[in-house]
Amino acid sequence: MKILFVASEGLPFSKTGGLADVIEALPKALVALGHDVTVLLPRYRNTRTVAAVLPSLTIPMGGKLRFPAIADGGHVNGVAYFFVEDPEYFDREQLYGVSGKDYPDNAERFGEFSRAAIEFCKRVWMPDVIHCHDWQTGLVPVLLQTEYAKDTAVQALPVIFTIHNMGYHGTFPRAALAKIGLPETLFTMEAMEFYGRVNFLKGALIFSDYLTTVSPKYAEEIQTPEFGHGLDGVVRERASNLTGILNGADYSAWSPQKDKLIVARYSATDLGGKTACKKNLLEVFGLSTDLIGKPLIGIVSRFASQKGFDLIEQIADKLLAEDLALVALGAGEPKYEKLFRDLQKSFPDKFALRISYDNILAHKIEAGADIFLMPSQYEPCGLNQIYSLKYGTVPVVRATGGLDDSIESYDPATGRGTGFKFKEYEATALLFAIRQALDVYRNSPAAWRQIQMSGMNKDFSWQASALEYSSLYETAVKSRNPKAETTSNQPGAKSDKISPATPTGKGSHGR
């Protein structure tokens, strides 16, 4: 089958969060199953490409035309990469905004990107199914079901839309409709209107053929007011077309037995190299190696309230009064960057910080830390807790979303478990869970080793998830055209043209 991924970021070219990891790993896993996969991304600053495939596309944007190019990025791990190139929109300092503020023209930027994705299908590579990700690509299904509904070239193309984080909607003033060339008829509760604003995510939820999110637990949670961020009613109405598929880990990149970015390799049967990695981590962060015998907690995260940093703020003094060390890597909301800078000044001998997105340091933390802290308010899936398991770095997490799905709470009575969880979103609950982990680490070495072994022996590889997606792609294609034949399990084969199908019917959707 020919599958087109459309996303706003993806490794090895661009990254701000876990979406980029998925856009690298899932296509590679699908290629291993025999599918023909192409990924379309914006061409951001410093992205190298091979050649221009189309030097100019004509894209209508309200009362004007824009002329982005399509550039060839070559193949990586059997996956073809192409880029929408428009320097005015994408050759910028950051992907989505600077200094904690979104770019004011994000509606236009990703509106153009979505239109270019459909034209890419018509002019460069026609897939059997399009797989879109997060609000930045939300206009692809909207456009296919409205402006392109009578275009016989693409009207039968089904769209799978994956919600990586329900908290990010892509909402804009009503005037954005005119700027991106969408009709006012879409500004209704049944389409894209959301409390007086235009909502890209809502459009995708309503107009996509099938919806997925990144863990089974999160698929349940987003149907509730607590986690639905105002769109739980829309999700409930599409529940029959929603499935939760747990993200996987790319163990070719995230395994202590294969990792080329750490100073020593190790395995579940020989943990000797982990001590060397811990020493190196302390050195890299400028902490004394005399701390080698103390529990070392690691954080790799976007610094945001969603990630539980308001809880960390409340317990920081008590936590750092413990006999331990802590290293943190990430960037995000200015108030939390300031929090960590202040903590580093107050506890320079046991707390170290790097404000950046640094893949090498992320690997070093996973390998060198003893405990990985992930106290998210909500977490659609999360990948770092899965990476931590493989590296024998015991996770302390909140029991939500994919964290709850992937971590088994340690039971001292049976010795079973892979980490420590807390349920209530409260600072005292977080501190209690951390102290539970510290107690086992300090006083029960054999039990700690068993927790590490249990985690390292877990298999969260992408193969099982890729099979689930493959099945869903087949279902989506057949739902649009029962007689359509796809080139499943024939890498590189050209699929037969899909004959037109009736667009998916839309019901009445509340906010």
Image (tube, rainbow, N blue to C red):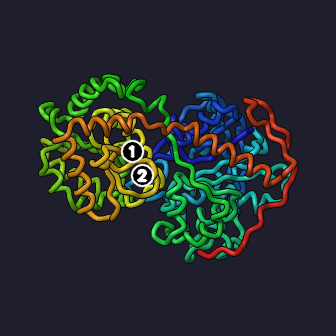
Q: Residue at x 44, y 47 (%)?
A: 406
> Is 330 positioned to the left or the right of 197 in the image?
left
> Is 452 positioned to the left or the right of 89 in the image?
left
* Pick the front one: 451 or 370: 451
Q: Residues within 10 Å of mark 1 (few under 14, many from 20)?
A: many
* Three-letter code, disc 1: Gln
* Pick the front one: 124 or 379: 379
Mark drawn on residue 385: 1
Q: Residue at x 67, y 41 (%)?
A: 69
* Pick the front one: 334 or 268: 268
* Three-letter code, disc 2: Leu
> Is 303 positioned to the left or the right of 468 in the image?
left
Q: Residue at x 56, y 41 (%)?
A: 23
Element carrying mark 2: helix
Quarter-of-image position of residue 267? top left
The residue to which callout 2 is attached is: 403
Q: Position of residue 149 (x, y in %)?
A: 81, 60
Element carrying mark 1: helix
Q: Position of residue 354 (x, y in %)?
A: 28, 42
Quarter of the image with the C terminus is bottom right
Q: Are marks 2 and 1 in contact (CB under 8 Å)?
A: yes
Q: Which of the two discs, 2 and 1, labels the residue nearer the N terminus? A: 1
Q: Residues within 10 Å of mark 2 (few under 14, many from 20)?
A: many
Q: Position of residue 233 (x, y in %)?
A: 58, 72
Whole-angstrom CA distance, mark 2 to mark 1, is: 7 Å
* Pick the front one: 234 or 221: 221
Quarter-of-image position of residue 83? top right
Q: Position of residue 331 (x, y in %)?
A: 35, 49
Total marks placed? 2
Is residue 46 among the parts visible in the rendering? no
Q: Name above or below for residue 70 compared with residue 399.
A: above
